[in-house]
Amino acid sequence: MHNCYRFRGLYSFLSAILMLMLAVPQPTLAQKEKKKSRKAIKAEAQARQTLIQRLQTHASILASDSLEGRRTGTPGEAKAVDYLVGVYRQMQIPAATSLGNYIQPFSIDEGKLPADKSYLKISDKPLQWGEDFFTPAFSAEKKVSATTAVAILEHNSPWWINITDTVAANTNNPHFLWDGWLRSTAEAAAQKGATAVVLYQTSGDMAFAYNPKDRAPQLAIPVWVVTPAGCRKAGINMEAAPYLEGNVAFAPKTRTGHNVVAWLDNGAPMTLVLGAHLDHLGYGEDENSRHTGAPAIHNGADDNASGTSALLELARLLKQKGSKSYNYLFTHFSGEELGLFGSKYLAEHLPAEAKNINYMMNMDMVGRLDKTSPTLTIGGLGTSPAWGSLIPTAAQSGITYKIDSSGTGPSDHTSFYRKDIPVLFFFTGLHTDYHKPSDDANLLNYEGMATIVGLLQQIIDNSATNGKLAFAKTREQSMGTARFKVSLGIMPDYTFSGTGVKADGVIDNRPGQKAGMQTGDIILQLGDYLITGMDTYMEALSRFNKGDKTRITVKRANEVKELGIEF
């Protein structure tokens, strides 16, 4: 699951009514079984045990060390994809014809890296990219050859700017924005006639690091940042007139993720989308782990080998004895942990066969149903008025249900809610192993997973006579983190690759909405801070306190607007 799922406790009227309905005593399993023959009861028990064993097999394979955490775009993800494709083939559930096969690739823009022809020499001494220097992502891509005095900032020549004192003075300054200062310093030099800028630090700890995700527009001149190690290697001093030779060139940094999509065609007029994400954190390379030790495999058994395994077995059951009133699109998303990349791509590139979608159901972390006090959270109740009657009639005896009405949250159902499709989200709760290497398969409650699979199948069967479910808008679920004292109240579009931060949703009665922000707005500046991407957005947001007033600049379509905002 992407970030942490936080339930606000502010339930809608629908949710309150639903809780009352769930509280009405349902016929117990024992009462139902009195009407069944012993042979039928034995067959059901055997089928359930087989289901549990299959769930355990799937999860044990998907959460094994050999898959190395199923990080998007890695060999571990490829192994997971191959396994899922093999299971669907064994079940004789085909791929969608319009996709060509089970695997739907999608690209993740991760910014840019230096190209092979990018280099820097000072006084004929070649410097090593990363160790001795780097070129900020906003640098122009140009070649420079010139001899210039370090101490003289001449018009129409490269400028050498010693940043050592500035770094020393602001090392412990929590209000100093390093990336913003670096860019503004280089930009000011360009405006005063510099043809290139070398910012060099002769001593101390290096304050800057290359940020491949910096989406700031490129300057008109090349820029290099030389580290203390690079200064020592090149022998830079204030009296020297070194010969500068360098070239700035970038190459796009992309990662390819892979969704797995299977299609069960019953010739029905409507389609259901049933989903779970297959990816996890790998070794924690994307800085989304809660682990603080040495790099380790994050097997992600609950998150989300549990939902992936449950979806496989739900597909098996629906093929064997599911309602023929629907076609079924079984979707295993990658890139969820990076920001719902795979589900958003699929929602925008659905197979041609998947027409007239009735609703979408998503399982993310369904493996830890508590054995002593089983509690299942169901989200999305407010996305259709039909859920209020369909879910109580399918409720499993002995389980407590927590209800959340919102159609959004940090998981893949959000991508379909954004397409005005009713959604449901199933979740057994957070735990101390969340986003840690300790989330292993031996900790899963496979009986509980089997119960949840049965619940989804029952909801599907119950909805078959309801026709097309009406869609309803709900409140937005915030995905902010506790590190900030304030928030704008927006849902960032993590797949946006342009300059700024795009609002994929705006939460009612929060600062952004009150200021006049709209879904689709691109934040370009917050107060004095330029916003070039998520990094600079989070950095800027951390500088504000409750009650602060400032201005926010957004791009809406082709118009730039400045709005007043109060946190």
Image: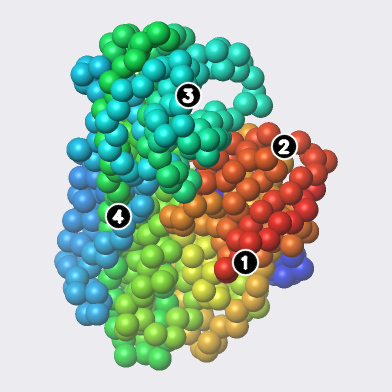
Q: Is residue 338 above or below residue 535?
A: below
- Report the Cα–Cα distance between label 2 and label 1: 26 Å
Q: Residue at x 60, y 13 (%)?
A: 169
Q: Nearer the viewer, mark 2 or mark 1?
A: 1
What percent of the width, then of the height, locates residue 34? 49, 71
Marks 1 and 2: in contact by CB < 8 Å?
Answer: no
Residue 466: x %, y % from top left = 55, 87
Image position of 501 (left or right of 245): right
Amino acid type at circle 2 is Phe
Measured Cα–Cα span from mark 4 to mark 2: 36 Å
Q: Nearer the viewer, mark 4 or mark 3?
A: 3
In depth, the one of 133 and 477 nearer the eye is: 133
Q: Sequence order check: which comes first, mark 2 or mark 1?
A: 2
| Residue type, numbered disc 4 | Gly
Identity of the residue drawn at 19% across and 74% down: 100
The residue type indicated by label 1 comes to Glu
Category of crowding for the residue at label 2, using alpha-carbon neighbours closer than 10 angstroms: few (below 14), some (14–19), many (at least 20) = some
Mark 1–mark 3 distance (CA, rounded to whole Å): 38 Å
Residue 24 showing in the rendered view:
no
Q: Is residue 261 visible?
A: yes
Disc 4: which residue: 257
Find out whether the residues at labels 4 and 3 contact each other: C-beta distance under 8 Å: no
Q: Nearer the viewer, mark 1 or mark 3?
A: 3
Distance from label 3 to label 2 (Cα)? Answer: 36 Å
At label 3, counting other C-alpha atoms closer than 10 Å, the crowd grade (few under 14, some 14-19, many 20 or more) is: some
Which residue is more in the foreground, 555 or 96?
555
